[in-house]
Image: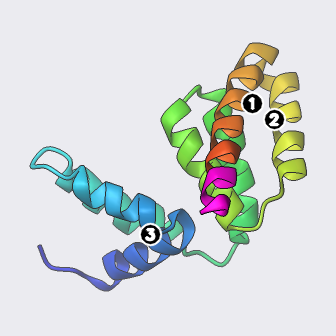
Amino acid sequence: MKKDALYKKGMKTRGEVLGAGREAAIVREEDDFSTPLRIFTTRYVWGEFWSGKGLPRKTRSLINVALLTALKCREELKTHIRAARNNGCTKAELRDVLKQCAVYAGVPVMRDAVRVAQEVFAEEKKAAKR
């Protein structure tokens, strides 16, 4: 696979947003089926949109948390709550996003997202003790 400029930019951005741990997991999870999909998302999700100048990464993170909450994408939500924390989002900001999701997407959806966020915060606390 030829690594074009957009792909390289996407790799850099994804690593900065998601952190080295998630980047390593993405590589470990690779197989013949997923590689073309990862190349696609690296170029266009990370190289094009996440690398764009229109919105700050923190804002993009809050939008993603809201969308993934509403779409009930638990694993991606966990990834993007971690990314939001990497991008400077506070617990209070994340809580406000989840409250807004309760209004527009429903309280049960918000409650599930709260449990996901609590898992991420527990991981953060455990990592901080090391």
SS for dot 2: helix
Which corner quadrant of the image does residue 77 belong to? top right
Stretch in magenta: 124-130
Left or right: 51 in relation to 7: right
- Kindly indicate the quadrant of the structure image that contains residue 56: bottom right
Where is 112 relative to 82, above or below? above
Determine whether label 2 and label 1 are within 8 Å by CB: yes
**Residue 15 seen in this snapshot:** yes
From the viewer's side, name the closer residue of 123 and 34: 123
Residue 105: image quadrant is top right
Quote the CA–CA distance across marks 3 and 1.
Answer: 25 Å
- For label 1, the residue is 114
Q: Is residue 39 left or right of residue 68?
A: left
Q: Are marks 3 and 2 in contact (CB under 8 Å)?
A: no
Q: What amino acid does circle 2 point to?
A: Leu
Could you tell me which residue is drawn at 20 percent across and 53 percent down?
Answer: 30
Residue under circle 3? 20
Does residue 50 appear anywhere in the picture? no
> What kind of secondary structure does the magenta stretch mostly adopt?
helix
Q: Nearer the viewer, residue 52 or 71?
A: 71
Q: Which quadrant: the N terminus? A: bottom left
Q: Can you give x and y, in whole percent of width and height, for residue 36 in the image? A: 19, 54
Contact? badges 3 and 1 (CB < 8 Å): no
- Mark found first going from the N terminus, 3 or 1: 3
The reply, left or right, for residue 129 in relation to residue 12 is right
Q: Nearer the viewer, mark 2 or mark 1?
A: 1
